[in-house]
Amino acid sequence: MWSYVIKRLLHMVPLLLGVSLLTFLLMALSPGNFFTALQQNPQVSPETVARLKAQFHLDQPWYVQYVFWFKNVLSGNFGYSMAYHIPATTLIVQRLWNTFLLSFAAMVVAWAVAVPLGVWAAVKKDSWVDHACSFIAFVGLSIPDVLLSLLALWFAAATGWFPVGGAQSPLYDFMPPAQQFWDRVHHLLLPALVLAASSLAGIMRQMRSNLLDTLRAEYVTAARARGLGEGWVVYKHALRNAINPLLTIFGYSLANLLSGAFIVENIMAWPGLGRLTMEAFFAKDSYLVVDSVVMATALLVAGNFIADLLLAWSDPRIRLK
């Protein structure tokens, strides 16, 4: 198992290096840089612009910039944000926590709702409950995150039940701790529900399918023949085996939530890593763009890595292979 883990970790290194190198190349191919707009300001001398470019190595070719960036990363320094005027590490840590919080909340909502609904739909197969759950899954899988986010924004603006954008209120720092907690939950609830919608539908359908297959197994028929109650057969015998395959999609659902969070953050103005990446891109803050993209890639790789570990833990054939 340890050799499997080490191999998977070693595979991450060339992937992150390739992503960072490709991001630097794409930023170099895009027209202009952060100081392009500053050059058009008559109050700023060309010498000042040239000095600032030299300070951030923007007067060098892109591969030279990459070498300077990579050396700083090896020493734990992710550079300085030219747009926000603070170290990139501080900015990324703040936004990374918001992205993780949004993804984690969406994951809790998706699994807490999808698993019971999937079990209920399987137990009540072909009933109105099953049809209602199938309709919910169809809607969740059919509506794109972009459209669902826009509908959620319209609902929040029309009803006033939820705040529109942001992670906290303007007077957050002046609130008592309990009110601060509920303020963050209030801002988090609607984006988390939107992000959880598609994952909820997929997990619910998977849970229903797994449980239906398990209920047809011979050992379940034997348990019923021994006179055990239907509830005991379903929740004591069938459910345990039906839920095991979901372990393999747990990590992948986390990775999907992290990637989906980028869309939800930008539309619903949630101050996470995805929104930071877009803001840095439009500001031509090249080093912050690369830092954000690499960190987002690391999160996706971590989600897939968790999925691989769960799969290897549940299936010994994966470890042996």
Image (tube, rainbow, N blue to C red):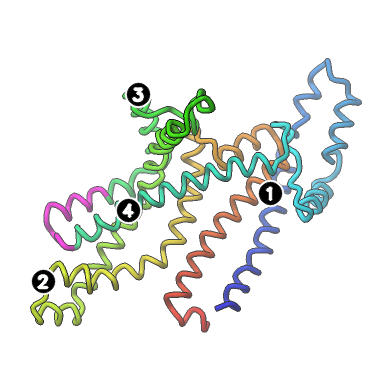
Q: Are marks 1 and 3 in contact (CB under 8 Å)?
A: no
The disc, 1 or 2, on the residue closer to the chain's N-terminal end is: 1
The earlier-in-sequence mark between 1 and 3 is 1
Q: Is residue 234 above or below residue 290?
A: below
Residue underneath mark 2: 229
Q: Which three-letter amino acid code belongs to the residue tagged 2? A: Gly
For residue 112, which numbered disc appears in the image? 4
Helix, strand or loop for disc 1? helix
Residue depth check, mark 4 versus mark 1: number of the one nearer the observer: 4
Q: For the residues marked 1 and 2, what is the alpha-carbon distance in whole angstroms?
A: 59 Å
Camera-nearest residue between 245 and 285? 245
Residue 280 included in the magenta stretch of the image? no
Q: Earlier in the sequence, mark 4 or mark 1?
A: 1
Name the amino acid type tagged 3. Gly
Q: Is residue 147 visible?
A: no
Labels 3 and 2: the sequence-earlier one: 3
Q: Which residue is mark 3?
A: 160
Give the residues drawn in magenta, as a range.
123-136
Q: Amino acid at mark 1?
A: Thr
Label 2 residue SS: loop
For marks 1 and 3, give the CA distance: 40 Å
Vertical order, 184 against 296 (above or below) = above
Residue lying at 77% horizontally and 28% vertically, measured from the top left:
36
The structure residue drawn at horizontal position 37% and vertical position 42%, both measured from the top left corner, is 193
